Amino acid sequence: MQLLWDVRVSLDLFLGGLGVGAFLVGVILYYVDVKNYEGFVKKSFVIAPLLVIAGLLLLLTELGRPLNVIKTIYAVNPTSFMSIGIFLQSAFVAVALLIAFKALTSGVSSLSSKIIYAGAILAGLVGLYHGFLLSGIAKEPWNNAIPVIFFISSILAGSSLMILLNLDSLENLVARFKLPLIINMILTLELAAVFAWVYNLALTTASSKHAYDVLISSFSMEFWVLSILIGLIAPLVIFTLVILNKLSLKAVAIPTFSIIVAGSFFLKNLVVYLGQAV
Amino acid sequence: MAKKYGMIIDLHRCVGCGACDLACKSENNTPVGIDWASHKIETYGVFPKVTYTHTPTLCNHCEDAPCVRVCPTHAMHKTEEGFVVHDPSICIGCKSCMLADPYGVIFFNKTDAFSDYVSDDSSIVKGGTFSKKELSDKAKAPFPNFNAARGAGGYEAIRRKGTVEKCTFCNHRVAQGLSPACVVACPADARIFGDLNDEKSQIATTLKAHKPTVLLPEKGTNPKVFYIRSYN
Ligand code: SF4
Ligand code: SF4
């Protein structure tokens, strides 16, 4: 396998996704009840741009001529998702940094809801861009299911990270939003998207079947165990037991939300590598 | 009508000598491991019915080039004459083009090519044989068989590390009315290069007279390197 994009690209997609997810969960809580969740929202708005920037810095180290990135401002290619993504990410980072600065200096409640709305739209676009970056290259496993899979994974991982950082709000979130139920719905959606992707690979063309063969032969551990079993099915089962009152969420919250975050990395890393192995 | 260049490789004439590969290397100053012109060899079948094929390969200068589509800066771009060429001055070295190219004909410069000719002053027999550095100093060139003409039109004669490079259909030679180096070097006259839009050109008439094939037609890239007849 000629590895052109290594783990730094996976980490960019993972950290960027965490940032987008963290920001969006902050936006939801901001609009629902900013007074009650001020601390949570503030943390979300501060952490989100830092995670995206960390991912971008890692990505820069992957480039052969990182200083030339400045030229992407005028050398634009509208058919390239990377070209569009550079603008989207820059705009998101700028808006998110402004929001973070205002949240830290004047408090979350002083933020204008218009700027938060703009940030939410940009976060959504950046979240989708992460998948389109790969699907635009059109390698067999990098098909049109990837933007959906990556976006849902980012929402799951970002919100899990923020819950881990706000464990004191857990009880409130469970009582108010039926948190395990919502997370299970998103986990089920992600499982469905991943299975649609695998199904598509296994049944479509000769080259997609080859990609499927490589997935289940060379990446079976990363896919079935790390991404599916640990990252999606285990939390789904745990939250189901919580809903059925067989487990206390408090007791399992830290490991369960942690494996959701880790699973997001494993899944994105697997997809990045698989595309280059076929 | 604007010119649109393409190439035919007559697999029946090709003797598999690799002269094209070597001519390309010396014309374009490519280091070891970076082969703009290359070939693939396949042996298949069950003895005694075995078949051997030798297929010269290069950038296909595709009509619908995925490498051009994905490049974030237009560093990989198409000229009016249909050449798919690269501008290292705006390349960010993201390697998207390499990932999108289904033919594997784009190369990344991990290191500065031929830099050993600047730094390596070790010789096999001290005082008896030349070191790489001495050779390069005496030739007054980055390395002894350096082709300065490759640097025509602002293109880097030797590409520095951090960017990609690939076959340009020798556009610096074509600009002077010459054929690409691989075409000239072929001892079997297996390569025909010319304007596909000129109905009377040798390439256009030859294409009409044969049933040409292209590599990976299912990728929908519309290659402009055509293959006619077969090796055996
Ligand atoms: S063969 Fe590859 S590098 Fe050449 S134009 Fe086609 S896609 Fe681009
Ligand atoms: S490596 Fe350079 S030429 Fe290739 S896609 Fe990236 S910027 Fe464009």
Image (cartoon, rainbow, N blue to C red):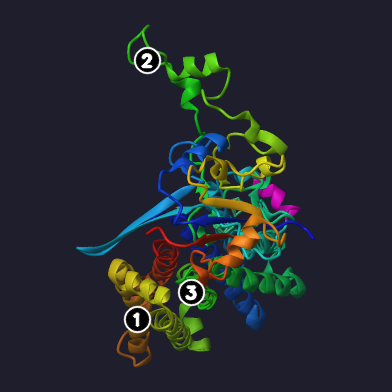
Looking at the rendered structure, the secondary structure element under dot 1 is helix
Residue A182 position in % (x across, y down): 48, 86
Residue A203 position in % (x across, y down): 39, 84
Q: Residue at x 34, y 81 (%)?
A: A233
Amino acid at the residue labelled 2: Ser
Q: Quadrant of residue B43?
A: bottom left
**Residue B72 in the figure: left or right of residue B16:** right
- Residue that badge 2 annotates: B123
Same subunit, tags 3 and 1: yes
Residue A11 position in % (x across, y down): 47, 59
Work out whether residue A110 or residue B223 is closer to the camera in this orientation and state it.
B223
Split into 4 quadrants, where in the image is the N terminus of chain B? bottom right
Query: What is the chain identity of the residue bearing mark 1?
Result: A
Looking at the rendered structure, the secondary structure element under dot 3 is helix
Looking at the rendered structure, the secondary structure element under dot 2 is loop
Decide whether residue B156 is among the magenta residues: no
Q: Residue at x 56, y 71 (%)?
A: B220
- Residue B80 higher or lower than A223, as above or below: above
Marks 2/1: CA–CA distance: 63 Å
**Residue A39 in the figure: left or right of residue A271:** right
Residues at marks 2 and 1 touching, judged by CB atoms closer than 8 Å? no
Specify start and end residues of the magenta stretch as a single range: A68-75
- Residue that badge 1 annotates: A233
Magenta: main secondary structure = helix
Amino acid at the residue labelled 3: Ser
Query: What is the chain identity of the residue bearing mark 2?
Result: B
Decide whether residue A73 is among the magenta residues: yes
Split into 4 quadrants, where in the image is the C terminus of chain B? bottom left
Among all residues in the image, which is located at the extreme left?
Answer: B47
Marks 3/1: CA–CA distance: 13 Å
Q: Which mark is residue A153?
A: 3
